[in-house]
Image: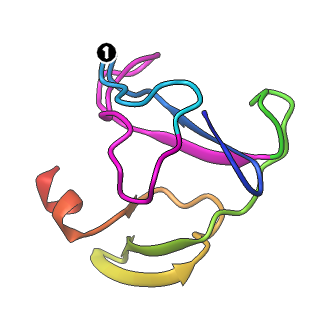
Amino acid sequence: MLEGRPGVALLAHLRSGSIRVHVGQSVSMGEPLGEVGNSGNSTLPHLHFQVMDGRDPLKAKGIPCKFQKYQKFNNGVWEDVSDSIPQERATSYWPNKETASAM
């Protein structure tokens, strides 16, 4: 979990042993935090990311998160999106073209 303003960010299912930061460390935009893995009940690597108003993901309320740049898969085509909050129930978003092509 990353604590800051306006809340707490949860990154779940990181690869075991891949976390590169420690408790209390400040991080900067673009700094690697860990590697996507398949911890939990999954056979494929994936990441759950959410921003919440508290530390308990079972009790906290979600807070919308605006991204500077990402791609959205829409009707068979990857579309660039800037300065936007992804729509609810979105399923296919990538941070950039390099990430999408690596999959």
Hey, which residue is sitting farthest front in the picture? 25
Dividing the picture into quarters, in which one does residue 77 lie? bottom left
Give the SS element for disc 1. loop
Q: Residue at x 48, y 56 (%)?
A: 91
User: What residue is disc 1 on?
Assistant: 17
Does residue 85 show up magenta in the picture?
Answer: no
Q: Residue at x 40, y 18 (%)?
A: 39
As shown in the figure, which amino acid type bears the numbered disc 1?
Gly
Q: Residue at x 48, y 47 (%)?
A: 27
Left/right of residue 6 with respect to residue 17 in the rendered view: right
Instruction: Please name the predominant secondary structure of the magenta segment in the image.
Output: loop
Looking at the image, which is closer to me, 26 or 76?
26
Stretch of the chain drawn in magenta: 26-52
Residue 31 at what x, y percent from top left? 35, 50
Does residue 27 show up magenta in the picture?
Answer: yes
Looking at the image, which is closer to me, 59 or 4?
4
